[in-house]
Amino acid sequence: MPTSPPPAPQDTGRAVAVALLNLSGLGLGYALTRRRLLMVACWLATAILLVVALPADADGVPAAILALYVLLLLLAAAHGAYLGLRTRLVWPGRAPLALLLGLVLLAVPAGGALWYQDAREEAVQQALLDRLSSADHLVAADAGKPFSTAEPDYREVLGVYRELVGDHPGSRAARKVPASLRTYYAKVAAPYDSQDYCTAVAPLTYLRTVPGELPDATVGSLAGWPDDRLATSLYECGAQGLSAGDQNWVTRFGDLMKTFPRSAQTAKVAPAVDAAVKKAQNGVGGSGSCAAVEELQRLDTRIGDLKTASGDPGGKLASAASRAGRSGDDGAYDCGVQQYRSGDFSGAQQTMDTFVAGHPHHRNRALAQKIAIAAEVAQTIPAAGKKLPTTATGGSISVTVKNDSPDDVTVLYTGPVTGSFTLKACGGCRSYLLADTLMSTFKPCAGGKDYPQRTLQLPVGTTYFVHKPNGGRVTTAGSDTAKLRPGYIYTECAYTTQGFGGSGT
């Protein structure tokens, strides 16, 4: 029995029909020419293609496999044409009918290709939607995280939005980006809705950069969405810092005034600063004078910084800075009084000395000088600081102070009357040895010399004296407490030793 049909006269129509039937990918041309193994080979090639291609995905069929399959179809068609030229068909017997069948069956690969293209397009759309969904979920997952922690994710999501609308503008995912972007803005700016204004500054500042990353049509009205919120956050955060004494308020107000110079929030900055100055001013004169003065001095400095940072449009900060500076200087007197009364004599002396130096015409300058003297005396004789000195002068009791020292000596005294003066060095006088001062016969200012001296008229009562040699020969000031009574004449003597200072009456 023959394995192949006997040769037939050449028939071009039959050859074309067999070629067309093989192009269907089903190997029907081989079936009609009794080439069953070749028909199975066509089935196998088509099956492999279907396994690779289905289900359709966004990546499609690898180009190499598709090219190989097309090449196999073309070879099958060419080989089928060769066979069909001299081989009778099993069915149909007439070539025109087979040719018509081949043309009809070409709809199979053509229709399959169209179907696959639609399926692949749908897969692409779904993949883009999945990517958008993943980006949206990432934003939701970052809710509650600090902005610094979540910012890389926010930027990654923004990159996804940018790619969808830029590379796939007609996709369903791209059409959904504006809605996702609105949610994105709301999530990033969540601290603002919670009135956590200081925390909201960074994310809102970031959101103002987003329009530069996406097309205008995508951003739409969101372009200006963060502005008012950021201005409010900068103001509220700055106001909180101003109230709490946090110096960061200068940065917040400065950023607000530079970024939104004509906003309603900027218009509130100067009144807020002015109110802080008034509040600090109200603290001067009471037990919190020193704290109020420190606050006023800080405000003076910080307002100056804010003026520099913002340019102070309209000059509205200048008056507040001026008042803070003046009030701080004036309040220094009250601070010194508070320090004195609380026993901080060193602080009181320093405060009053600074006040006296900076206020040559102030009404309290004379008393401030007295308080500075009394505070210095009280550092050596604490009992001298029990009462605040007055500007009283004179008295009925004579007290002569002499200088038995080779150095100039400053004499400070306080009590019913407070003051100070300097006695010049005694020519021919010497510093005493410590052993001399311990002897019972030791009597300074008793050598009959012409000692530099000064006589004071002081009231009855206790006066405290401190002698400060100016030559640097002693390490501490000498002191004396004199209880002055009527009917007596008193003498104070200042002298120096090689290691200690002393005084006597």
Image (cartoon, grey):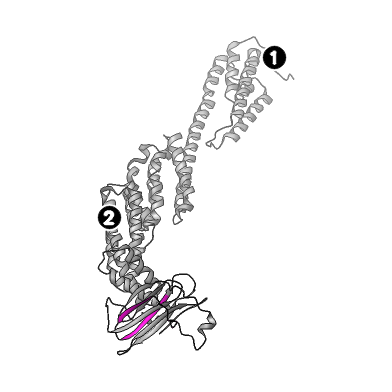
Q: Is residue 90 visible?
A: no
Q: Which residues are magenta?
A: 441-467
Q: If the image is split into quadrants, where does the N terminus sit?
A: top right
The one of 203 and 262 positioned closer to us in this rendering: 262
Instruction: Indicate yes or no whether the magenta region holds residue 443.
Output: yes
The circle drawn on residue 294 is none
Q: Is residue 235 left or right of residue 494?
A: left
Which element is circle 1 on? loop
The circle drawn on residue 270 is 2
Q: Mark 1: few, some, or many residues within 10 Å (few <14, many ≥20)? A: few
244 up-or-down from 265: above or below: below
| Disc 1: which residue | 6
Give the image location of residue 178, x and y in percent.
38, 42
Spatial distance from mark 2 to mark 1, Cα to Cα? 109 Å
The amino acid type found where label 1 is placed reads Pro
The one of 303 and 188 positioned closer to us in this rendering: 303
Q: Is residue 161 left or right of residue 79?
A: left
Please name the residue shown 47% across and 36% down the image. Answer: 122
- The single residue placed furthest to the top in the displayed view is 9
The one of 267 and 125 positioned closer to us in this rendering: 267
Does the residue at mark 2 contact the one at mark 1 (Cβ under 8 Å)?
Answer: no
Instruction: Indicate yes or no whether the magenta region holds residue 321.
Output: no
Q: If the image is split into quadrants, where does the C terminus sit?
A: bottom left
Q: Nearer the viewer, mark 2 or mark 1?
A: 2
Mark 2 and mark 1 lie on one chain; the one further toward the N terminus is 1
Q: Is residue 108 visible?
A: yes
Which element is circle 2 on? helix
The amino acid type found where label 2 is placed reads Ala
